[in-house]
Image: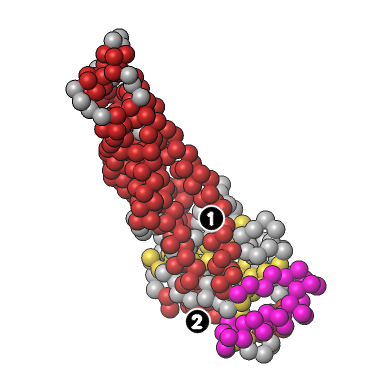
Amino acid sequence: NLPRDLGRTATTAGALMAGVSLAVSFGSFTYSFTRTLEDWIEQTLPGDLFLTQGAALGGTSMRNIPMADSLFEELAALPGVSTVRRVRIVELPFRGLIPKAVATDIDVFLKHAKMSLLEGEQPALVAALKRGEIGVSENFARRFNVHMGDQIPIATRTGTRQFRVAGVFIDYTSDVGSVLFDRPVYVETFGDNRVDTYELHLRDRTQSEALRRTINERYADKLDLFVLTNREFRDEVNHTTEQIFSLVRALELVALIVAVLGINNAQLANVLDRVRELGVLRALGMLRRQTSRMVVVEAALVGALGTLAGLLLGIALGDVLLNHINLVQTGWYFPYRLSWAAIAEVTCLTVPASALAGLYPARAAARLVVTEALDYE
């Protein structure tokens, strides 16, 4: 029965390896995605208060309601407000796909935020944007094979116009890509002066709660405004990200449970196939607890072997998911960050669970009657 037992054990370890590799690869993918997104938000959204209408995340939610620009002067005049940045995000059809157009007050943006450029330099980009040129995101450039200095056609209210690409920057606004306009250029080109988000920068951040109360009293009920602090705005983004990956987490857990149950079934089948062998061992003096312990140790070893192989495979698979499959699908490049939390979580779950999965087969082996086991065919 040795070849059959080895084959069954290898199959079980392989199933566990698949479950572990899935958990580790998706864990590393999720960790890399969220950490990179958090770093990007910290660099590009440094405002103290964010005002949106209809939805907490302006411009990125179907419930978002664009606001008229009439609030700009009033918000800028509020006590304690240093600067106000306006953000407008709209769909921009291009070559059969729907990237995003992002229009903002570029001077205010770069006064407080940091832009990571892959092509071009920031002073030159700012000057070019104010002249009517555009910047494109990394995934836009990769998807449409567009680079700095290229001319691309964009449909406007007066017809198709050629825009020169003044730089390529890292941006995660859209998985199709984004095109950056200076706000005055966007308003003139598209005839749209609405605003999705007002980003307020304060002279004293400790006054953010007091200013939020003032804004809520004046405008919130009348305009259905959401007024979020920087931390609350980030929490909204993180909550949205967690919702996206919650199904992935459930699939990881199901895969691990199925793999551990497979160890239970394999060990039970091994016990049934080795009844006479176990009977001989018992007849030679092996105690019931020793028989039980042997089966549990076998299950734990199978779990450890499958977990180790799964960890190695998962690390490699995570890199493939992030830097190959994701890159092709979205054009986004995320630095690969190994999730040690996912590795520790999987290891602490699968090895003890594998040992526990061997308990029932171990009890079945310990309950064997020696005489009946020796006569078993």
Magenta segment range?
A: 201-229
Which secondary structure, mark 2?
helix
In the rendered image, residue 252, in percent from the top left (x then y), is placed at 45, 43
Q: In which quadrant of the rendered image does the N terminus lie? A: top left
Residue drawn 71% across and 67% down?
53
Answer whether residue 217 is magenta in the image.
yes
* Rendered position, 14 above or below 29: above
Left or right of 263 on screen, residue 67: right
Image: 10 above or below 145: above
Residue 110 seen from this side = yes
**Is 292 within the magenta?**
no
Q: Position of residue 261 (x, y in %)?
A: 42, 33
Q: Residue at x 49, y 47 (%)?
A: 249
- Name the residue that disc number 1 marks: 242
In this rendering, would 300 be left or right of 111? Answer: left
User: What is the CA distance from the residue labelled 1 to the residue labelled 2?
Assistant: 31 Å
Residue extending farthest to the right is: 222
The crowding category of the residue bearing disc 2, from other C-alpha atoms within 10 Å (few below 14, some 14 to 19, many at least 20), is few
Predominant secondary structure, magenta span? helix
Amino acid type at circle 2 is Lys
Question: Front-most of 41 and 268?
Answer: 268
Q: Residue 310 location in percent, x, y?
A: 32, 41
Mark closer to the chain start, 1 or 2? 2
The local crowd at label 1, few if under 14, some if 14 to 19, many if 20 or more residues have their Cα within 10 Å, is some
- Residue type at the position of mark 1: Glu
Q: Residue at x 34, y 30 (%)?
A: 362
Q: Dot 1 lies on which element?
A: helix
Residue mark closest to the camera, 1 vs 2: 1
Give the residue pinned by disc 2.
111
Q: Is residue 186 visible?
A: no
Quadrant in which the C terminus appears: top left
